[in-house]
Image: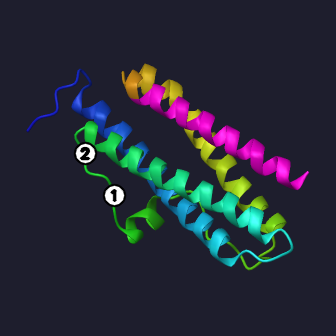
């Protein structure tokens, strides 16, 4: 059935593609957060392990929300590891420590990368593609990432 939500098919396609990239970034970040949760070592293991659990649960919700937003625009969400790796801006972790400081620094860099990507699309979605709904949605998502980044930064100061 045709999607008729007041946004042209061309604009919905562009926005859905950018959201697919964001979805890939978020899925890779989710996986990296699971890695941090599972493989953390050190004296602060218990508290940071629980914190990483909160983060990966929040990431799972974000992944689902973005995929559903893509569907609301009348497109299919990418849903394979291959497609996520082709679309993402993020990279796999290099070998480095499994201590909390090392893992937090890596996760922080990824959150900041996602913040920059989102910030670069907010006005474009609203102005160039006439999609105020997605612009508003990613603004809220950016604010979530900014709060997480602040908290991660506070752990390593």
Q: Quadrant of the N terminus?
A: top left
Could you say which is closer to the camera, residue 151 or residue 16? 151
Residue 129: name its quadrant: top left
8 relative position to 39: left or right: left
Could you say which is closer to the camera, residue 65 or residue 20? 65
User: Where are the magenta residues, as a range?
Assistant: 134-157
Q: Residue 127, relative to residue 74: is it above or below?
A: above
Residue 25 placement (x, y as % from top left): 52, 55
Q: Residue at x 77, y 76 (%)?
A: 98
Reading the image, the residue beneath label 2 is 75
Reading the image, the residue beneath label 1 is 78
SS class, disc 2: loop
Q: Are marks 1 and 2 in contact (CB under 8 Å)?
A: no
Q: Within 10 Å of the Cα at label 2, are there few (<14), some (14-19), or many (20+) other Cα atoms?
A: some
Q: Residue at x 52, y 29 (%)?
A: 122
Q: Main secondary structure of the magenta part?
A: helix
Residue 13: name its quadrant: top left
SS class, disc 1: loop
Q: Within 10 Å of the Cα at label 1, are there few (<14), some (14-19), or many (20+) other Cα atoms?
A: some
Residue 137 is one of the magenta-drawn residues: yes
Residue 58 placement (x, y as % from top left): 54, 51
Q: Residue at x 24, y 26 (%)?
A: 8
24 relative position to 11: left or right: right
Residue 155 placement (x, y as % from top left): 84, 53
Residue 110: name its quadrant: bottom right
Residue 138 is one of the magenta-drawn residues: yes
């Amino acid at each position: 059935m045709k999607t008729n939500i007041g946004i042209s098919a061309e604009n919905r396609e562009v926005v859905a593609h950018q959201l697919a990239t964001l979805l890939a970034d978020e899925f890779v970040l989710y996986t990296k957060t699971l890695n941090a949760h599972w493989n953390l070592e050190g004296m602060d293991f218990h508290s940071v392990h629980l914190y990483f659990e909160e983060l990966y649960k929040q990431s799972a919700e974000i992944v689902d929300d973005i995929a559903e937003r893509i569907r609301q625009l009348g497109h299919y969400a990418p849903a394979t590891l291959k497609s996520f790796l082709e679309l993402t801006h993020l990279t796999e972790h290099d070998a480095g420590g499994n201590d909390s400081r090392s893992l937090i620094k890596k996760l922080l860099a990824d959150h900041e990368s996602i913040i920059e990507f989102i910030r670069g699309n907010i006005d474009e979605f609203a102005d160039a593609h006439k999609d105020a709904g997605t612009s508003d949605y990613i603004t809220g998502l950016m604010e979530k990432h900014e709060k997480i980044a602040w908290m991660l930064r506070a752990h390593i100061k």
